[in-house]
Amino acid sequence: MARPVPSLPFDFAPRAEPPPAREPEGPRALTVGELDRIIKRSLDASFDSPVWVEGEVTGARPAPSGHLYFGFKDEREDASIDVAIYKASLTPRLRAMVVDGARIRLRGRPTFWAPRGRLQLVADRVEAAGRGALLEALERLKEKLTAEGLFDEAKKRPVPAEPRVIGVVTSKTGAVIHDICKVAWRRGGARILLAPALVQGAGAAASIRQALTALERLPEVDVIIVGRGGGSADDLAAFNDEELVRAVAACRVAVISAVGHEVDVTLTDFAADARAATPSQAAELAVPDTRARREALAHYRVRLVRAAHARIRDGERQLGEAQQRLGDPRLALASFQQSLDDRRARLEAAARRPIARRADRLATLERRLARLHPSVRLAHEARTLSALHGRVVARMGVVVGEREATLRGLAASLDALSPLKVLGRGYAIATTSRGAAVRDAGDVKVGETLDLRVARGRLTARVTKVVPAAGPGDASTRDEGEAKAP
């Protein structure tokens, strides 16, 4: 507010004019530095003592200054915070504990880093709390795919030496495609076919898989490079996706994985047919070095020419030595002809000797064969057979006469003992209905039917009375037996 001007005792004193009306002012704006300082003071006042925080390490990277920076993630919730451990608080044991995927407990104070406007936790103490859930899940997936044989070295295909078209799956705005094209141009040029894809964030795995499938369907593509630049474990998470890993392992052509830097390892690296530490190295693996090949070709040409000249000189030397040893060809031919004549004469003499021995042997066999001629042998056997035939006929007449006399005597004896002769004298043979001959009166019963055989015919009789024999020779008892015809 302006101070009043005092009045003067004269009328000609200048009169103060009223100040111009001022426009109403709004709230004063803070500078960025003031806001950062206010936030920092408020945060420091809220945490007057260190706190313990438990979580999983992601993207751990040591800085050239010796400090250690990494992300600290809660795998149960979508929450994370940046952590800084200054060089003064670092120990070898602490450095070994802070690795990607490790679950640890930190003691520190939350603070606000004004130059970057970033909230971070400055820690000074670390304790192990087990392996992180993300790392555990990644290890389980790796063991599962390994058991299925997706990472077997025997299934890896060699990178073609002369690829016609090289497919690249990466971001179209990143430095990877530029590095690959630059290396390919330097090594002699190659046709590069880019299938752009997201390499980080939500949907990155599906995008990479779709780009890989699109390149695989092109028949002219001979090899595919899948890559991106370095980053934290979260940035490279898409390359640990199970479906993407299976797609890389089942790809029609050889796949080169160039994900991150040399220290970064993903499951895609294990499934790919070859792994490169950087995208530039992947281009070197895929594109043959034309200059190096030309140099190697020139080197091989020089070696081949030298070897050919050496071989020609060696042949000329051997030819000269052979000519010296050979001498005059006519003398050599004459000497060989003489040896040939001598050996021919010896061969003919050696051939005639066994022929003569075999001729003598043949004459001896012919004489023996004449003595054993079939006509001579047949005549001798015919005489022997005629004599034997006369002896056989005479002996057969004697034997037949003796057998006829014996047969007549036996026939007479048999006829005398024939039952028919007995029946002819008036006797009969009685048999029961069962066919048994009746020899005793006790063998039959009254009323039983008997079969009586007489000399001519048969009779059937019924027993009406049985009189047993009183004693041997009792004729009266034999006469009392009666048989009544039925």
Image (cartoon, rainbow, N blue to C red):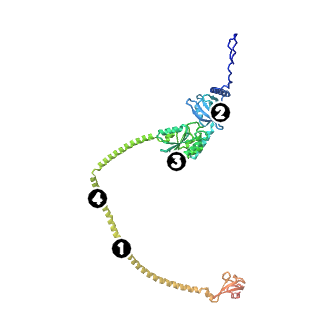
Within 10 Å of disc 4 (Cα), the crowding (few <14, some 14-19, many 20+) is: few
Q: Quadrant of residue 376?
A: bottom left
Q: Earlier in the sequence, mark 4 or mark 1?
A: 4
Q: Are marks 1 and 3 in contact (CB under 8 Å)?
A: no
Which amino acid type is shown beneath numbered disc 4? Asp
Q: How much space separates mark 3 and mark 2, taking CA atoms?
A: 54 Å
Query: In the rendering, at what x and y percent does residue 251 appear?
Result: 55, 46
Q: Give above or below for 255 relative to 61.
A: below
Please give the residue where the numbered disc 3 appears in the rendered image: 219
Q: Nearer the viewer, mark 3 or mark 2?
A: 3
Q: Is residue 482 visible?
A: no
Label at residue 341: 4
Query: How far apart are the alpha carbons under marks 2 and 4?
Result: 112 Å
Badge count: 4
Q: Secondary structure at mark 1?
A: helix
Residue 207 shows in this picture: yes
Q: Earlier in the sequence, mark 1 or mark 3?
A: 3
Residue 15, horizontal then vertical, whole percent: 68, 14
Instruction: Compute the Cα span from label 1 to label 3.
Output: 92 Å
Given contact means CB atoms under 8 Å apart, are the residues at marks 2 and 1 in contact? Answer: no
Choose between 358 and 459: the one closer to the eye.
358
Q: Secondary structure at mark 2?
A: strand
**Is 323 left, or right, of 6 in this rendering?**
left
Query: Gap between marks 2 and 1, in whole Å?
Result: 128 Å
First in sequence: mark 2 vs mark 4: 2
Residue that mark 2 sits on: 53
Crowding near the residue tagged with mark 2, few <14, some 14–19, many ≥20 C-alpha atoms within 10 Å:
some
Q: Residue 477: x, y in percent?
A: 70, 87
Q: Position of residue 277 (x, y in %)?
A: 52, 38
The secondary structure type at the circle numbered 3 is loop
